[in-house]
Image (tube, rainbow, N blue to C red):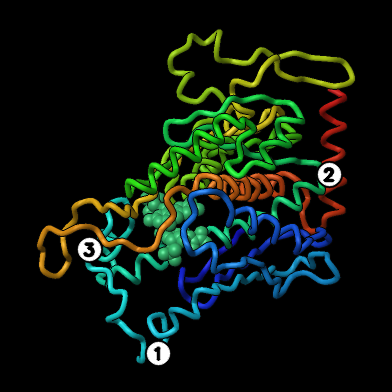
Amino acid sequence: MRFLTAGESHGPKLLGIIEGLPSGVHICQETIDESLRRRQQGPGRGGRMAIEQDAAIILSGVRGGLTTGAPLALEIENRDWANWREIMAVGAEADFTSRRVSAPRPGHADLTGSLKYRTEVRNILERASARETAMRVAVGNVARQLLAALGVEIRGRVLQVGRVKAQLRDDAEYWARVRASAWSVGDAEAEAEMSRQLEDARREGESLGGIMEVQALNLPPGLGSHAQWDRKLDGRIAQAVLSVQAIKGIEFGLGFEAGKRPGSLVHDPILYEKGKGFRRAGNRAGGIEGGMSNGEPILVRAVMKPIPTLYKPLPTVDLETKAAVEASVERSDVCAVPAALVVLENVLAWTLAEAVLEKFSSDSFSELEKDWQDYIRYLAAQ
Ligand SMILES: Cc1cc2nc3c(=O)[nH]c(=O)nc-3n(C[C@H](O)[C@H](O)[C@H](O)COP(=O)(O)O)c2cc1C
Ligand SMILES: C=C(O[C@@H]1CC(C(=O)O)=C[C@@H](OP(=O)(O)O)[C@H]1O)C(=O)O
């Protein structure tokens, strides 16, 4: 299975094409739209989110609510395009003078992109923009619906924003609170502190990043492979996660903490129960060993750097005059950690669904489900 996206931040639309889906997968457009709505929410977002009302239109590959096995094409409208028609025009009439960016923003793609492609900054930032993550969520959500039909659950939470850490729990009431929380934390005190910190950042022209965790539950062991570098599941998840704008680090399970502990306090002892098969005494590995899922929940943590556009801008150099100036200020989010969490949940779903389709028969959902169930029975019979 593969996908591509296209579209500029202020162009007319975002497009996505998914190739390689089995036939017979139930796809609910409203479920995609719900994930798109969640991505737009969260404190700290800028004025753009008041303009957009993201909804996906499925153009092909689904009939009567079921995939046909043909490429599934998606589009999402950019409502803001109405304000950018002249600047973003495809023809020779395009306006190259308005909203020209000549003071590249440290932390964004502006400078290196314009040097590499020998073009103006606008052409770079339009595509580098995290507007593209709307389509990444829609594409990932299709994969997430396929996984959900096999009983796989993906969930996420924000662990930290700036200097504020959330208290963590693992019961159903806590997870319901995480889902209802604007910050995606199940901790009212941390939530209030995060909001105070955000107001300070806004006042000071600062921006904020944070740390998120995404979990995938009910996956069997054996997704991915130890046999070749580009088939290793942890490597593939890392590539997908780090490809999300502003994500700068990833950990599985204990992550960097593992480097401080002796082996006996890192590796998860193996247990066996007749009729159920093998399991682990803990999950410090984060559900992946040897490049393969090991049957425990997959636990991924990722860090998002603070948003590069600062209302109190950093020093930069004007591309034309070479004078020292302040960086350009484009309308911007101050913090987008809860939005990035939604992106990561759906990006993880994509990579896991890909690995599922590689392991099992995948031309049709009925073959996939049968193969999956046979494998679960085989594991229990060990
Ligand atoms: C959901 C989301 C929203 C973002 N919003 C903004 C924004 O409003 N302004 C900005 O400068 N960067 C924003 N970013 C980050 C930039 O897109 C990103 O830092 C930039 O493309 C450079 O890529 P890199 O940080 O991966 O190196 C956002 C990122 C995400 C995931
Ligand atoms: C449009 C989205 O995020 C944008 C990501 C972004 C950036 O530089 O990454 C810059 C801002 O764009 P604008 O200047 O149009 O407000 C964000 O709003 C979105 O998340 O849908």
Percent position of residue 8, x then y: 46, 71
Which quadrant would residue 114 be assigned to in this image? bottom left
Which residue appears at 65% of the width and 69% of the height?
Answer: 74
Mark 3 residue crowding within 10 angstroms, few (<14) / some (14–19) / many (20+): many
Ligand number 2: quarter of image: bottom left
Label 1 near label 3: C-beta < 8 Å? no
Of 56 and 277, nearer the camera is: 56
- Choose mark 3 or mark 1, whichever is in front: 3
For marks 3 and 1, give the CA distance: 26 Å
At label 2, the amino acid type is: Asp
Residue bearing the label numbered 3 = 103
Residue bearing the label numbered 2 = 371
Of 23 and 334, nearer the camera is: 334
Mark 2 residue crowding within 10 angstroms, few (<14) / some (14–19) / many (20+): some
Query: Compared to 309, does 6 lie above or below?
Result: below
Q: If you read the primary sequence from the N terminus, does the residue marked by circle 1 or circle 2 appear first?
A: 1
Q: If you read the primary sequence from the N terminus, does the residue marked by circle 2 or circle 3 appear first?
A: 3
Dot label at residue 91: 1
Q: Quadrant of the N terminus?
A: bottom right
For marks 2 and 3, give the CA distance: 56 Å
Q: Relative to 49, is 294 on the left or the right?
A: right
Q: Relative to 94, is 229 on the left or the right?
A: right
Residue at mark 1: C-beta within 8 A of ligand 2: no
**Is disc 3 placed on a helix, strand or loop?**
loop
Q: Relative to 369, is 133 on the left or the right?
A: left
Q: Quadrant of the C terminus?
A: top right
For residue 131, say whether it is visible: no
**Is disc 2 placed on a helix, strand or loop?**
helix
